[in-house]
Amino acid sequence: MPFSDQKSQFRETKSYHYFSKVNQKFPSAGYIFKWLCICSILGICVGSVSAFFLISLQWATELRESNLWLIALLPVAGFAIGLLYHYFGKEVEGGNNLLIDTIHNPKDWIPFKMAPFVLIGTITTHIFGGSAGREGTALQMAGAIGDQLSRIFKFNPEDRKVLLIAAISAGFGSVFGTPLAGAVFGLEVFLIGRLRYDAIFPAFLSAILASLVTDAWQVSHTHYHISFIPKISVVNILFSILAGLFFGVTAAFFSKTIRQTGRLFKTYITYPPLRPFVGGILVACGVWAIGTTNYIGLGIPTILESFEQSLPAYDFLLKIVFTIITLSAGFKGGEVTPLFFIGATLGNALSYFIPLPVGLLAGMGFVAVFAGATNTPLACMLMAIELFGAEPGVYVAIACVVSYLFSGNTSIYHAQVVGEPKNSFFDQNQGKKISEL
C-alpha cells in the first residue's frame, strides 16, 4: 500500500485523534506519553527476545564445546541455512543493511520472519562452529518487531523511522547490557557524522527498558576489568593515538576484505546454498589444522584473557580469517563480537611494543576497532565507560576517534549514508552510501 494511503488511514484512527488533541494542549507531554507507551511495548518485547537469544547462545556454545565432532557438520549446517534463506527468506537477506535502508527510505514493511530466520541461522552457526557474533541477530529481531508495531499503530513514515531507530537501540543495548551505548548506536549508525535528535527520547527509553527487561529475566552479561590505568600524560596520549591508528587500519581492512570476499563467493558460486557449504568446509578444516576452537564462536574466553595476560600476536589475524569466511559465505550472526575479539587481541599484541598496560590496550582495541568498522565513535566511547568504568575514558575516546578517522570511507554496513564527511577532503562523499564509494 502506498504511504500516502497509509498516512490517510492513520489520520482516520482514534489513536491519531487522541494523540493530536494531547499534542495540541501539551506538546512535550503528548510526545513523551506517546513514546512512553510505544517504547514500553517495544522494550518488553525486545528485552525478552534478547534474553531468550542470549540463553540460546550460551546453550549452543556449551553444546559445541562438549561435542567437538559437531564442527565436522558445519558445511551441512551452512547448506541448510543457505536453503532456508534462498527459498523462503530472500526478502530478509539484507539483514542490518535492510534496516538501515528502511530508515533512510521506508517502503515495504520488514517481514516479521526476519526475526525467527536470523535467530535459527545464528544459533545453527554457533552450534556447528562458525565464527560470528550476536549484534546482527539482536538488531534484526528488534527491527522486525519494531516495524510490526509501526504497522499495528499505523505510523506515518517519519514515526516509523523513529521507531526503527528505537528498535535498533533496544536490540543493541539489551544484548550487550549497555543501554547508553545502545541508544547512541541507534542514533549514530545509519547516518555517518550526524545524529537524529528527534529520536533521542525513544532511543534512550527503548534501550534502557529493553536492557532492564533482559536483566529481569536473570540473563547475565560478560564483565570486563582493566586492572591498571596509568596517569594521563602527553606521552601516553601519543601512544594512544598510535594505537588508534592500528585499530582504524585494522577496521578498514576487515570491512573491505569481508565485502570483497563476499563478492568472490557470489562470483564463483552461483547457487547461494553452496556458498555457506564451501565456507563451512574451509572453517572446519581450519579448526582441524590449528587444533583449537579459540577462533570460532563468540570467543569470549580469549577476550577475557586478553585483558590479563600476553597472548600470541597472531590471534587477531586468525579471528579475522575465520570471521570473514564464515559471514561472507552466508552464515548468520553479527560482526561486532568478533570485532571485540579482534580489537582486544590486537591491543594485546600492541603491548609488545607500545608501553601501555596490556589490559588498557585490550580495552581500547575492544571498542576502537568496532568504532572504526561501524563509524560509531560516540556509541563506542559510552560502551567503554559502561563496560570498564570512567577511569580509562580519555584513552578509549582517543582510540575511538583516531580509529574512526583512519578507517576511512569503509564500514561493515554498506547501507550507511555519509551525513557529514570525516574531513574536508571527502566533501564530495556527502549524501552517498558506503556502497557507492
Image (spheres, rainbow, N blue to C red):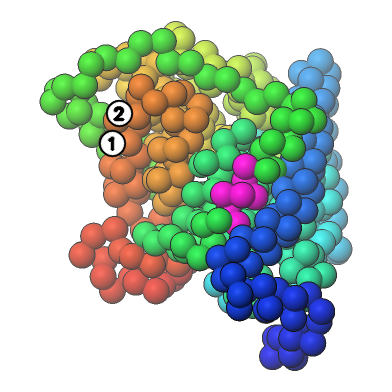
Give residue 395's mark.
2
| Rendering coords of residue 191 (x, y %) | 45, 63
Q: Which residue is mark 1?
A: 398
State the residue at coordinates (45%, 31%).
384
Quadrant in the picture for residue 334: top right
Q: Is residue 93 above or below residue 366?
A: below
State the residue at coordinates (46%, 23%).
388
Q: Is residue 425 left or right of residue 294?
A: left
Say which element carries label 2: helix
* Residue 333 showing in the rendered view: no
State the residue at coordinates (26%, 70%).
427
| Camera-nearest residue between 20 and 347 | 20
Quadrant in the picture for residue 182: top right
The answer for how far apart the CA atoms under marks 2 and 1 are is 5 Å
Is residue 255 a member of the stretch shown in magenta?
A: no
Figure quadrant of the N terminus: bottom right
Figure quadrant of the C terminus: bottom left
In the image, what residue type sits under mark 1? Ile
State the residue at coordinates (21%, 21%).
232
| Camera-nearest residue between 332 and 258 | 332
User: Which residues are the magenta region?
Assistant: 202-208
Residue at the extreme left: 234
Give residue 61's mark.
none
What secondary structure do most residues of the magenta stretch adopt? helix
Q: Is residue 423 left or right of residue 229?
A: left
